[in-house]
Image (tube, rainbow, N blue to C red):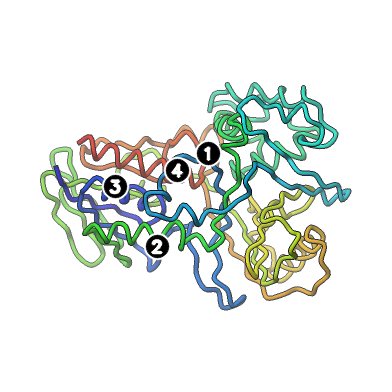
């Protein structure tokens, strides 16, 4: 049966739901409150650098099944580029030490027995001490599950979990951290190749999705803020936008793919996270040295990950609350100094831009995770999507796409 589905929110969770439903033959109409699509996963032209930059630096892995299936469906998988093997260069700015983490393709972690492939000054038994994370419940904290100190923690576990949880790892949910370990380190190298949208997030993950939906008779409209959901008999019957109303047919469905606070305001009694964490991204217009890898993990610095794009060096700082109020030029100069050390260059501060997302992700603590809802609601034709819903993962692109897929699957089962 063909039905009309209204998707509220044109972030990647809403678009992934729309793509899945459009592929199944349904009429999909996406309504976005702002004037741009993509949410926190978008590109735009930045006047300060004179470049098209991403709102935030995002990394996918070759084992992100939902995200890669989404890209494959919209015909943009080739735009996700990365090395042929699961290799992650690192540098420790405290002592200048450099190494490359090299995961073997198979699921059996033979790499931990290879001194040249694992973190320097670590032993195989250090890695097996992470086993409690794999089986931990989401109600436990990382700091109560494993020892959060030592060489392996400082040089691998802390950077990995900080990037995934966007919170100081000891405070984070051990269950969510365990999900990351299972889908990365324990999944083997074939699932851990790093993939980056070198041409920009919008060109790879957003624009092709819009084209896919529109090519199948759907629509994506901006400036459409939803003010109220009217319900009757356990179903949503009317969507009240800032500029008009839409009455729903008996078989129509709605996917609410908006941020947690907006969803809670629209759906009375909805349980949703109430605490959030910031991410800070810095972009510098500078041609990367030819020998610089596309991605470098950085230890002992405010810089955590350095991305090398054409004409641009970009930095991500997770759990960035401490940097939100730092004067912009002061922050740019401090970060650029460390970028120069990592890239081994000497250069004055080039044109730059700072993007500070104050509410980038929900706070991945046990308490906040417990407030995440599933995809279904008490209204039989209303479903939820967003990385803040209970996807089994922290707030990641893979989690966003997974949430959209789950919401779409509920619609398909109506």
Q: Nearer the viewer, mark 2 or mark 3?
A: 2
Question: According to the image, label 1 marks what residue?
Answer: 63
Q: Which residue is mark 3?
A: 255
Q: Is residue 45 above or below residue 94?
A: below
Q: Check disc 4 and report its element: helix, strand or loop.
A: loop
CB contact under 8 Å: marks 3 and 4: no
Q: Residue at x 60, y 51 (%)?
A: 82
Give residue 251's position: percent from left, percent from top: 13, 44
Q: Which mark is residue 399?
A: none
Tell me the residue that label 4 is attached to: 388
| Earlier residue among tags 2 and 1 | 1
Q: Secondary structure at mark 2?
A: helix
For residue 82, side relative to residue 408 (left or right): right
Marks counted in the figure total: 4
Q: Does label 2 or label 3 sit earlier along the sequence?
A: 2
Q: CA distance from mark 4 to mark 2?
A: 23 Å
């Amino acid at each position: 049966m063909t039905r009309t589905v209204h998707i509220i929110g044109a972030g990647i969770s809403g678009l992934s739901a729309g793509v899945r439903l459009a592929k199944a033959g349904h009429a999909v109409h996406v309504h976005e409150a702002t004037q741009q699509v993509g949410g926190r996963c978008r590109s735009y032209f930045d006047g300060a650098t004179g470049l098209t930059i991403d709102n935030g630096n995002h990394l996918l892995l070759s084992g992100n099944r939902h995200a890669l299936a989404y890209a494959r469906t919209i015909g943009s998988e080739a735009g996700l580029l990365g090395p042929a093997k699961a290799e992650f260069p690192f540098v420790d700015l405290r002592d200048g030490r450099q190494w490359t983490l090299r995961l073997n393709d198979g699921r059996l972690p033979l790499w931990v027995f290879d001194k040249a492939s694992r973190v320097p000054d670590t032993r195989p038994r250090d890695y097996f001490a992470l086993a409690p994370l794999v089986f931990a419940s989401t109600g436990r904290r990382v700091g109560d599950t494993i020892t959060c100190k030592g060489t392996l923690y400082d040089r691998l576990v802390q950077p990995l979990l900080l990037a995934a949880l966007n919170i100081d790892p000891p405070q984070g949910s051990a269950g969510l951290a365990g999900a990351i370990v299972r889908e990365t380190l324990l999944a083997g190298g074939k699932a851990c190749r790093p993939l980056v949208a070198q041409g920009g997030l919008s060109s790879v993950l957003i624009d092709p999705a819009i084209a896919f939906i529109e090519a199948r008779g759907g629509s994506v409209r901006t400036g459409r803020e939803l003010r109220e959901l009217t319900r009757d008999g356990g179903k949503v019957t009317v969507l009240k936008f800032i500029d008009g109303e839409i009455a729903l047919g008996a078989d129509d469905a709605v996917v609410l793919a908006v941020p947690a606070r907006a969803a809670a305001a629209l759906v009375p009694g909805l349980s949703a996270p109430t605490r959030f964490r910031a991410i800070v991204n810095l972009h510098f217009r500078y041609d990367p040295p030819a020998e610089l890898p596309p991605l470098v993990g950085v230890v002992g610095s405010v810089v955590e990950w350095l991305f090398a794009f054409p004409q641009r060096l970009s930095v991500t700082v997770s759990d960035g609350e401490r940097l939100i109020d730092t004067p912009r030029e002061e922050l740019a100069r401090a970060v650029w100094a460390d970028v120069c050390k990592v890239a081994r260059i000497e250069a004055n501060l080039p044109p730059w831009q700072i993007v500070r997302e104050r509410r980038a992700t929900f706070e991945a603590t046990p308490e906040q995770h417990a407030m995440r809802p599933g995809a279904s609601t008490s209204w039989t034709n209303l479903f939820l999507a967003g990385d803040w819903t209970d996807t089994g993962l922290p707030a990641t692109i893979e989690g966003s796409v997974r949430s959209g897929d789950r919401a779409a699957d509920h619609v398909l089962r109506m």
